[in-house]
Image (spheres, coloured by chain):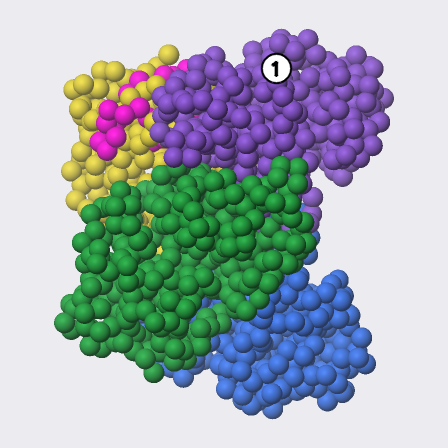
Chain colours: A blue, B green, C purple, D yellow
Amino acid sequence: MYKIGIVGASGYTGVELARLLVNHPDVELAVATSRQYAGQKLADVYPNLRGLTDIVLEDVVFADLVDRADLFFTAVPHQTAMNIVPAFLAAGKKVVDLSADFRIKDAQVYEAWYQAHIAKEFLDEAVYGLPEINRAQIKGARLVANPGCYPTAILLGLAPLLKNGLVDPATIIADCKSGASGAGRAASVATLYCEVTAGFKAYKVGSHRHTPEIEQEISRLAGQEVAISFTPHLVPMVRGILSTVYAGLVKEVTQDEVDDLYRDFYQNERFVRPCLPGTFPSTHFVRGSNFCDIGCKVDLRTGRIVIVSAIDNLVKGAAGQAVQNMNILLGLDEAAGLGVVPLFP
Amino acid sequence: MYKIGIVGASGYTGVELARLLVNHPDVELAVATSRQYAGQKLADVYPNLRGLTDIVLEDVVFADLVDRADLFFTAVPHQTAMNIVPAFLAAGKKVVDLSADFRIKDAQVYEAWYQAHIAKEFLDEAVYGLPEINRAQIKGARLVANPGCYPTAILLGLAPLLKNGLVDPATIIADCKSGASGAGRAASVATLYCEVTAGFKAYKVGSHRHTPEIEQEISRLAGQEVAISFTPHLVPMVRGILSTVYAGLVKEVTQDEVDDLYRDFYQNERFVRPCLPGTFPSTHFVRGSNFCDIGCKVDLRTGRIVIVSAIDNLVKGAAGQAVQNMNILLGLDEAAGLGVVPLFP
Amino acid sequence: MYKIGIVGASGYTGVELARLLVNHPDVELAVATSRQYAGQKLADVYPNLRGLTDIVLEDVVFADLVDRADLFFTAVPHQTAMNIVPAFLAAGKKVVDLSADFRIKDAQVYEAWYQAHIAKEFLDEAVYGLPEINRAQIKGARLVANPGCYPTAILLGLAPLLKNGLVDPATIIADCKSGASGAGRAASVATLYCEVTAGFKAYKVGSHRHTPEIEQEISRLAGQEVAISFTPHLVPMVRGILSTVYAGLVKEVTQDEVDDLYRDFYQNERFVRPCLPGTFPSTHFVRGSNFCDIGCKVDLRTGRIVIVSAIDNLVKGAAGQAVQNMNILLGLDEAAGLGVVPLFP
Amino acid sequence: MYKIGIVGASGYTGVELARLLVNHPDVELAVATSRQYAGQKLADVYPNLRGLTDIVLEDVVFADLVDRADLFFTAVPHQTAMNIVPAFLAAGKKVVDLSADFRIKDAQVYEAWYQAHIAKEFLDEAVYGLPEINRAQIKGARLVANPGCYPTAILLGLAPLLKNGLVDPATIIADCKSGASGAGRAASVATLYCEVTAGFKAYKVGSHRHTPEIEQEISRLAGQEVAISFTPHLVPMVRGILSTVYAGLVKEVTQDEVDDLYRDFYQNERFVRPCLPGTFPSTHFVRGSNFCDIGCKVDLRTGRIVIVSAIDNLVKGAAGQAVQNMNILLGLDEAAGLGVVPLFP
């Protein structure tokens, strides 16, 4: 029974980690921190957890908590993460960091999109935690940079095409739509119920910080430097990302060939479900689960392929993928604790 | 490993049973019927289940399916249930019926609110499946009448008061609010997205068919014949019932005494969670789970007590309670397969 | 062309006033204040108004603005209102106050539920602005206390019964449900999209501040002191209040008699629409409009009557009723500017 | 006072026409048909209209109704429209047809995407009713083909760029998102509340019937034959379309130049509102109104421009644009009856 700590347990990502860990057969939630709610039971802040865990939130006092867990999730904002992760590593702990701080390999790129980086020496070591692509490297790592929600949806959708050279990376356009939980639990006018429900909008058009992360990983898969168009949108729903990606085909393929490609590429993956041919995913059918569903359409009229992928942004796009990475790091069954059936309706 | 059948697996209640059973450690989903989708995989109709079950829906041919399971859930409309349940019993099977057909003990009452009853001889034998009240009788039963969603929320909220004679049953008013999944999956204009979202209304004011069921069970708990006011409302959400019940106090009690009463009454129950004193439930915190959360307020200004209870109508109000009853009938851990953590946010 | 000022124009109620006034044939929006957004165009803060008004928000500098309008709406929180209303009156302006500060006649009651009152000398003079009940007094007033949203829905529903002595006021229970816009536009975790959507809860059970206002007006209509049970609930929708009121009948009446009573009572009212017999209102059908729809059910089984009423909380429950009061105060057509057709779907 | 008829008044588009016409200063709703609800008052089917119109729905008996109006809206499904429009024209009536039947100029294209056309002789004459582009032709027409909702949003967004030759039409990708009211009011499982809310999906990927209409009009604006990628998505909201269009720039332009271009192009249009530079539209701010809001982003990293436009699909995307066309046809103020302020929140 491994002991696990969550730094930043009272945000939506943190409590989602807790939701998954309380039912995990092989680990125990031993530490949960929250500056804002220190001293309160997590289950009093999130009453859905009542009766399931008695853990008390505590302030982040490194010396007090470092010895009480084997692995830590850092579910804190970027910039905060780079300030605490090195100490955990130094203490011999494994870390799955859910912030953006260790995802970008090139510190200059990071600093252009975020702010100054104070722990650059860990950028090389950090493994980009997309298990379906980087499973082998994750196995031996001590620091996993858990991918962003949008990049996860886009990359799982594109990987089979990029690895097989079927599309021109320079033509990639990713039009993505996310539920509101991605914005976190901070009080703000922009994410009030009345400002989100019953409306739809684009935001950070051409300027979202996930752009360099997506481009880095697409470039790696494609073997060439790539710039993409990426537009995020806010959907009036809590959970879910749907990614619609367009790319120009560089060779003639049939719909059947592409359907076979996806089926084969993901045949041993337990969390990626290519849709039945001719059908497309909905965020409905992945809600609460670690699944990524993918459908695609070869459009001969335009010479493009359209790939649609769906994840739950809080699970495969954050906490679930983090638990998957934890399982790999600890040598557990990769799907342990991740058996939640998607909740529909 | 018990084998289980679901008659009526393609409605929202049926697929919710499937959701719970695919993760159940001690039973196996062996039969699933659907007239409409016979021949299709359940997971093709409900893609949330892809990768989790390969069961194929079949038409209801009694002779073909009766021997393939030990216990059957009948998740069919009232009137249909009374036509098929007797045969399963005659074949020595246990049945948890999710319709209204075996809930009302008095056939005349049933026939006044529903239609003619053709299996009256089973009304006496059927046990009203509210485990927190009738656990002992359920244990030895072969036919359990699974309670309605509204009655479950109301009765769990009122039971401690009624059993202790604290309120005047003649003063009970139950103002209840349900999500739209209670209306089922039939195509109809009234339950279209555009007709439900962003609006709120009462329906079947003073005439809902759950009224006699609620009155029967309140009368039993109170030891006297009772008529109540019951008004259901439709909330623009999928899952959840919140029940707000008003009753006149017949003796002076303090808020503390009532809080203690609820805590004691339900202290050994795994699915009933009295709220912290001074707090009230939200359907948010029970979503997807078998929990019933209860809060109450002693109002000395008016001499009334207000009891607020919340359940997921598809789980504790239907499929989850049915699985709980199944567990009792089969001698399993009562909570087996019901460990789903409520999904919030 | 009267000139109108809105003090507090950037909250949901303030901008709703602006929405109605920009289309009003007889008045001109001349002043709009906002501490937070002073210096910005109202239409830049609320882009729905782009192209419809160029008014610039300004800070509340009394001397600068008092002479620029004939009538002021004070759409500010309670306690703020009592600090500014007297000065407008002293300057000879008419005021429609949308806060609670001048609704409660008994200063002691006000102070028990709110805080100290510093302008008690205006309590007698202020007219409770429910035109359907107090039209005559509003006509000659200079200060109208615009009713709360819940009280409006409850009182319009109960007035015909109370005025005709059909119900026992001591038995009144008001179970009310409101959309989230009632909470205003302040940043807070409790009203985030993810905390409101897809859930339903009661709040301030037995302790909401509208209670004394409702009791005061019911007492006036009934001619006796009354204490009621009032429970507000939060519905995952933006606009709308549905009020379900229960009361014991004191004489035998038929459904037809009650239907006739409502039709007659409101026959000359342009904003109250009794539902067709046997039908009940939905907040859907009043959205964006100043209508109050009312349905009722005589329940002989329990000796009670159930009255269901629906309003848009931002219109008939706030800004629309305020404009209606303004029209009366200024001698305009009472419905001027209030012709918006309810938006459905 | 012109007399107006609506053929197909009980669908969402039909009742939206009625909503706009009851407040129109220069026309009178004289005829409203509905096969399903013939004999009922429109206001009993849609209680939002109670007190605003007494019109009774009637069956479509051409001889009975043709003489009672000067202009007819045909708000019926494609294929139905082509069966009735010619008779109205033959009787000397003007027609605004809201179906797809007269939008496609090339009968072969129409028949490839829809079905056989039985009134091809009117295709040449019909004017594509996008007033901001085709106002002059609409003026003298007797048959206006009211544009589809998606095409309206896309074309208004692209017109300034295409007319000025700034983008390569072959690179156009339109990723569009619509609320559920676009699916109409027919009972179906796919549009049930529980199937739409809280989820997001693409549909008819690469195969939606608006594709040829969009391509026809883009080709006309661009002066060359164009094939585009078009993907519609279903948003869990009632009203609104947001269109995100990507196109490759063919010359270097600055953001300022493009902002100026849009401002100038639409400076005399009352229903198109270019957003403030650096801001993007939301469907929130056009709800219930005839506005189209447009924002755009020049992305030098990728050499593309991203254009985001928002409309209310039932208004500028259907009934509002139809009324705008009616106003032009009848020589009325083009904005008459279209002054509804967008409803926010």
Residue C206 image offset from top left, x and y in percent: 64, 41
Residue C100 image offset from top left, x and y in percent: 71, 29
Q: In this view, does B245 lie above or below C88?
A: below
Q: Is residue A340 left or right of residue D97?
A: right
Q: Is residue B103 left or right of residue A320?
A: left
Point out the image quarter for the C terminus of chain A.
bottom left
Mark 1 neighbour density, 10 Å: few (under 14) some (14–19) many (20 or more): few
Q: Which residue is drawn at 75% across and 29% down?
A: C109
Q: Which residue is drawn at 44% across and 39% down?
A: B229
Residue A91 quadrant: bottom right
Chain to which the residue tagged by mark 1 belongs: C
Q: In this view, does A66 lie to the left or right of B105?
A: right
Residue C237 image offset from top left, x and y in percent: 52, 43
Membership of A217 in magenta stretch: no
* Residue A177 visible in the snapshot: no
Query: Which range of residues does the magenta coloring cover?
Result: D14-42
* Residue A136 visible in the snapshot: yes
Q: Which residue is drawn at 42% across and 43% down?
A: B226
